[in-house]
């Protein structure tokens, strides 16, 4: 299957390409970037490792060559400043994003193609992509809180000195300031995390606050995130390519789950070759449900102010 990464010359796009190459499932990976020279350099560097990483075809291309892609991963966008919320990016990124979607459509977009939005603010731009492409809602989705969920689980494991692969803890809602930690289902190797002596309310609050500020922390220390988001992107793409029916917190148009309608945000979603097959209404604590609904309200207000068409 063919994956095109738009913005593949940047930090996030190149890390995603590397993660996909190491995963070995995408037979063809196209790197597309406004800076053609950088795209060619990244593609060449990755191609040099093909003999050791599964033999995928990796090359720099353009929108015309992207036609026929199974999955478009859009990572292009202006970088978030350390003191800037993701939602503050909306006015700066919308025009660029519209031009990308229109270029994809103009070159030829398959009816069964998928759009995976990574650019921020991801929930708003996912809604914009859905409106502008005309594809079914199930085939247009954003990375959502996949990265937040990975950070949350990893930080919990680090603090409690547990195996990170055994810790499962979700973040739902907006990929941004109103994200919601789901402690009701947090577990380690199938056992409730809340049953651990060290998992106190104070600990829970501290680890969530660090999770919420992790993006800004990484920007401050190294200029921007890359490796973890690349792995998160790979997880979603592999769920599609392998028809996994994986339950993931991706962002897509919610129409009824948790009494939320007409907004893209992250709720538990079954992801397969069809895209987002369905949303799963797993029972939440009342405060978690209220937080999720408040997150949807905040996103709707931002969407209205931005007048995104």
Image (spheres, rainbow, N blue to C red):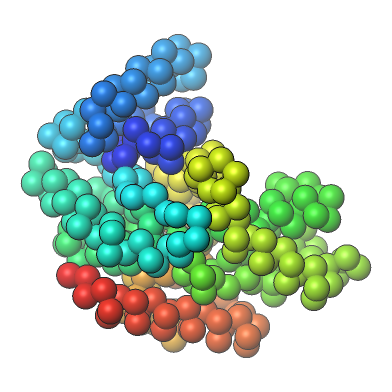
Q: Can residue 55 be seen here?
A: no
Q: Looking at the picture, how far across and down is residue 271, in whole percent?
A: 44, 56
Residue 1's place in the image compared with 126, above or below, is above
Q: Is the N terminus in the top left, top right, bottom left or bottom right quadrant?
A: top left
Number of numbered labels in the structure image: 0
Q: Looking at the picture, how far across and down is residue 2, in whole percent?
A: 30, 34
Residue 76 occupies quadrant: top left
Left or right? Give the position of 290 relative to 197. left
Q: Residue at x 28, y 59 (%)?
A: 92
Q: Is the C terminus in the top left, top right, bottom left or bottom right quadrant?
A: bottom left
**As rendered, which of 215 and 233 lies closer to the eye?**
215
Q: Residue at x 77, y 50 (%)?
A: 158
Q: Residue at x 22, y 52 (%)?
A: 96
Left or right? Give the position of 69 relative to 81. left
**As rendered, which of 236 and 290 lies closer to the eye?**
290
Q: Residue at x 40, y 18 (%)?
A: 45
Q: Looking at the picture, how far across and down is residue 100, in whole percent?
A: 20, 48
**As rendered, which of 112 and 51 lies closer to the eye?**
51
Q: Residue furthest left?
A: 106
Left or right? Give the position of 79 relative to 284. left
Q: Looking at the picture, how far across and down is residue 276, in whole percent?
A: 38, 60
Residue 199's place in the image compared with 255, above or below, is above
């Amino acid at each position: 299957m063919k994956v095109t990464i738009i913005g593949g010359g940047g930090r996030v796009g190149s890390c995603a390409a590397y993660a996909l190459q190491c995963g070995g499932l995408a037979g063809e990976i196209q790197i597309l970037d406004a800076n053609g020279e950088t795209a060619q350099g990244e593609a060449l560097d990755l191609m040099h490792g093909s003999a050791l990483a599964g033999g995928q075809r990796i090359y720099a291309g353009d929108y015309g060559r992207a036609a026929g892609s199974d999955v478009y991963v859009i990572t292009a966008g202006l970088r978030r400043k350390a003191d800037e919320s993701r939602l503050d990016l909306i006015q700066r990124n919308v025009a660029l994003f519209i031009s990308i979607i229109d270029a994809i459509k103009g070159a030829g977009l398959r009816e069964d193609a998928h759009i995976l939005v990574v650019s921020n603010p991801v929930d708003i731009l996912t809604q914009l992509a859905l409106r502008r492409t005309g594809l079914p809602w199930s085939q247009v989705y954003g990375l959502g809180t996949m990265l937040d969920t990975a950070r949350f689980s990893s930080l919990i494991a680090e603090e409690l000195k547990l195996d990170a692969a055994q810790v499962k803890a979700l973040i739902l809602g907006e990929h941004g300031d109103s994200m919601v930690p789901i402690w009701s289902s947090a577990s380690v190797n199938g056992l409730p995390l809340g049953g651990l002596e060290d998992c106190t309310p104070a600990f829970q609050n501290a680890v969530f606050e660090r999770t919420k500020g992790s993006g800004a922390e990484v920007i401050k220390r190294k200029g921007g995130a890359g490796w973890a988001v690349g792995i998160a992107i790979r997880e979603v793409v592999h769920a599609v390519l392998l028809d996994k029916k994986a339950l993931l917190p991706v962002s897509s148009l919610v129409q009824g789950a948790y009494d939320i309608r007409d907004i893209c945000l992250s709720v538990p979603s079954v992801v397969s070759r069809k895209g987002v097959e369905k949303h799963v209404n797993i029972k939440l604590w009342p405060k978690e449900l209220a937080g999720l609904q408040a997150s949807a309200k905040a996103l709707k207000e931002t969407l209205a102010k931005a007048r995104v068409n």
